[in-house]
Image (cartoon, rainbow, N blue to C red):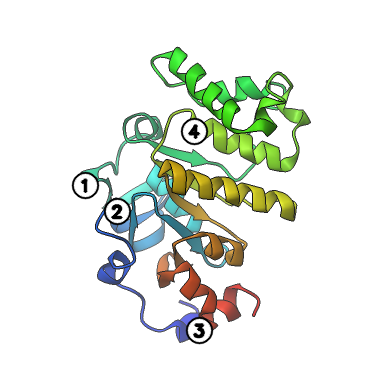
Amino acid sequence: MSSQYEVLGKAPGPEDLKNLSSEDIHLTIKNLNAGYGKMEILHNFDLFVSKAQSLCLIGPNGAGKSTILHSIYGFTNIFSGKIEIDGKEITNLTPAEKLKSVGIAYILQDNSVFPDMTVEENLLMGGFIKDKTEESYQEAEKILDKYERLRNRRNQPAKVLSGGERRLLEISRALVMKPSVLLVDEPSIGLEPRYIDMVFEILGDLQKNEKKTIILVEQNAKKGLEFSDIGYVLVSGQTAIAGRGDDLLKNDDVGRLFLGG
């Protein structure tokens, strides 16, 4: 670790991380070494998150935050270690298998809506690997019932949506497969403040009322920690500090390095 982070002291071990979650551990990463090609980015990485709990990953660029999401979803080379859902190992399942059989959905940070398709068609794309297409229609209807912003534009091309509405559509499209885990990469990136609040309200509703487990990467560390139950501060592919979101907001080292204070 670089010298500016040495003040962060002793890194938390697996037991410390486990203590931040309840007995009902939903997703576990054990001793993971992973990266791209032959380059290892995550080193002996551990993670524990409970059912319907939110975990925010913060840290400098290149620390490995998105690599964690990619590893859970199946986009990296995993050199060693295990990823489990409810005690079942899923380390080497493909992204499609992870979405379909264990309910992990990945919401990309870049603008991934199909601009010329209607809002409804975009939603239905979320269920493209479902065996029964009528289920996708039923889920899309439920989403349109819930979110008036999308319902009012259901037959319009997605390119007419505002930035915040596009992000809502990206999240909603992932919900068509009824996932239990949402991996959310930079939900606030490129959005105006009022839309950032809207997106976090939606994620909060999904966590509290639909019992989704949420793991997010967020450059806006303050916003991410305010939202999340727990936070991990990553440095050089390892967790340097972990704690409850509220506690990390009050931590002087975290404040100085990541919160601009």
Residue type (three-letter) at the residue carrying disc 4: Leu
Q: Quadrant of residue 102?
A: top left
Name the residue that disc number 1 marks: 87
What's the CA distance linking mark 2 and mark 3? 30 Å
Element under disc 4? helix
Residue type (three-letter) at the residue carrying disc 1: Gly
Residue 175 at x, y = what percent?
49, 33
Circle 2 Cα neighbour tier, 10 Å, few/some/many (<14 / 14–19 / ≥20): many
Name the image quarter holding the N terminus.
bottom left
The number of callouts visible is 4
Name the residue that disc number 2 marks: 28
Circle 3 Cα neighbour tier, 10 Å, few/some/many (<14 / 14–19 / ≥20): few
Q: Is residue 214 above or below residue 111?
A: below
What's the CA distance linking mark 1 and mark 3? 37 Å
Residue type (three-letter) at the residue carrying disc 3: Ser
Q: Is residue 64 visible?
A: no
User: Which of label 1 and label 3 is nearer to you?
Assistant: 1
Residue 253 at x, y = what percent?
52, 82
Image position of 123 (left or right of 239): right
Q: Quadrant of residue 11?
A: bottom left
The answer to whether marks 2 and 1 mark residues whose Cβ atoms lie closer than 8 Å is: yes
Name the residue that disc number 4 marks: 175
Q: Is residue 112 above or below residue 187?
A: above
Residues 133 and 140: in front is 140
User: Which of label 4 and label 3 is nearer to you?
Assistant: 4
